[in-house]
Amino acid sequence: MSDTIETLARPAHREVTSDRTAKRVMWLYIGPGLILVGAMVIAGLGLRMAQGGMHTFQPGLFYSLMTLHGSAMMVGMALCGMGLLWYLFAQEGPLNPTTAVVACALILIGAVLVAISVLVGGFGAAWTFLYPLPFVGTYWPSWATGVFLAGIACVVLGWTIWCLQMLGGVLTRYGGLRGAFAWDLVWSPSKFAKSGQTPPPPQAFAVLVSAVDGLLAGSAGMLVGVALFVRWLDPTLPLDPLWVKNLTYIFGHTLANLTIYMPLAAVYVALPRYTHHRHWHTSAVLAVAWWATLVFVAIAYFHHLYMDFAQPRAVQYIGEAASYLAAFPPAVVTVFGGALLVYRSGFRWTLGSMFLYVGMIGWVVGGIGALLDVTVAFNIYFHNTLWVVAHFHTYLLEGALLFVLGWVFHCLEERSGIVSSRAVRTLIGLGVFGGGAWLLLGWYLAGAQGVPRRYALQPAPGTDISWWASLGGIILVVGLIMCGIEAIRLARRPAHREVPAA
Amino acid sequence: MTRRGALQLVAAVSGVLAVALVVRSLAEGAEAIDVRSHHLTHAVLILGGAAAALALTAANRRPDSLPEKPQWLLPAILGPLGGMVLMVPTFYPYMNAHPTVHALSHLGHISAGFVTAWCGERYRVRIGWTTTLFLEAMAVGAAFGFGVTR
């Protein structure tokens, strides 16, 4: 306890990484991350249009592009969240930029290897393939499989380095797990208040949860990655398919979840800056909510294995319960808290604040879609249909991506001292939110009709719905292009003033 | 006994026990052992090496406030990867038939555990514990599917 208090008593800005360096590291992550995401939005639109019959891809190319779309989108979104969190935590305690640069370089090398395996080798097993894929029934050369696995291994190594750096930073800054979890704030609040200490800020919980669950995902990814790589070299090696599937989803599901939780820190930091004198402080409720998130995100993946009869029944119940419970902390604490923060606060609506606020709506809508899917009675009908694609695109495209764009525009607005005009905000809003909602609706409708996911040629009514949904996708891309032009316009303006961060 | 002395004793005992396991497998000669048991034995060896390193670093603990030392991070991550490579079941039949190579590979497991924990703690306080925990989870996890079927 005394150790914890002593550590918390340190000024928050002691020995912090310089703001200029921290910003450079942040853009080193967010820049390539957004480029990857942008390119993959275009690729994704091409896939959707092909499903709608607007054009055709060569056999195999559809699945290769789908693989690239999925893996590069995950890497791109993860890079954005990692850069954002790194920058925010660098305001709290010292972080070594070299470590962050090495992690980023490894991830980008991994992305290049994945691109080579897909674009040159034609690898097309999707980013979360299930064993005996990618070894049996393939149409691409064996080397492409090896290069893809090596690429994912580089991504996992870079991710692990980042997680360890962030975890080390949090534990050092707040005096171990007890301080980082705000244990004393929750269990001995009066004592904690009397001590005059301050708990970790809300964004530190996002760092902690991302690092711990991220390491769990990274370990599972490393283990299954080594196993698959050895299986690639030695085709006689037996692997337990259920074991591979469990590890694949600990890695894949957790990483996908964390890409949403990481940029959430931007909401905690930036949203209050658009209000008049309101702050997002750490309360016992917020701390407990993040403890719950830490646990539920790690075990919710079991809902991917409902159809596996050999999976122990107990973990099926755990999967359903954890998936439901995982919804409460963000809904109750972050989204409800965010809405209350904005309510009657004299909120300033800019592009940055608009993206952050609408991102919370997208997160909730996607979350409800996910909850329906994890309900066993619905899952019987929705399993591996476009409903799955609908819900994760909702909280990635209209949730996590909007948090990142909100943060980017927040930085640009603070730097330039100007905000976008109402007309520009309306046009971008119509494109990104309107086009996005139209695109997503197509997946929800097709999913409810039982149209399967990952099909180049869809059974009826998939093709018709895809055609209409593609129009929404085109509007979304136009909105994102306008967004990019506006970002460049703001970035080219001279710096208004140096604003102290977070 | 001082805390430091006790920790050094723990380090020595952990290391000696791990090495004793290696010597035992050398003394027993060629043996047939199923893949799952083999993985679990390796997990114990890794734990021995890691426990020795953690006890040693705890006896010579760096202050919390010291900044990270990035040069130690890569070996702390490559340690688990090396440990996993040594657990490739393809090598097991050969190792079972060649006790000396088998013993050397077991020393490799102890080293992987030691390097993972030691370098992690050198990188930043408490990180060695984290890397050890995840390496051990991977080693035990391997016993349920890596070269093993139901």
Image (spheres, rainbow, N blue to C red):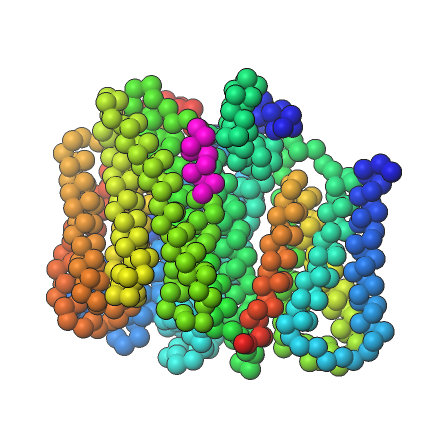
Asked whether residue B43 is in view, the answer is yes
Q: State the residue lying farthest toward the right.
A: B1
Picture coordinates of residue A121, whole percent (x, y): 40, 73
The quadrant of the picture occupied by the N terminus of chain A is: top right
Q: Quadrant of residue A491?
A: top left
Picture coordinates of residue A127, whole percent (x, y): 39, 64
Residue appearing at x 20%, y 71% in the figure:
A458
Asked whether residue A158 is in view, the answer is no
Left or right: A423 as drawn, with respect to A62: left
Vertical placement of residue B147 versus A424, above or below: below
Q: Which residues are magenta?
A: A283-292
Vertical placement of residue B101 versus B61, above or below: below
Picture coordinates of residue B30, whole percent (x, y): 78, 80
Residue appearing at x 52%, y 21% in the figure:
A190
The quadrant of the picture occupied by the C terminus of chain A is: top left
Q: Is residue A288 magenta?
A: yes
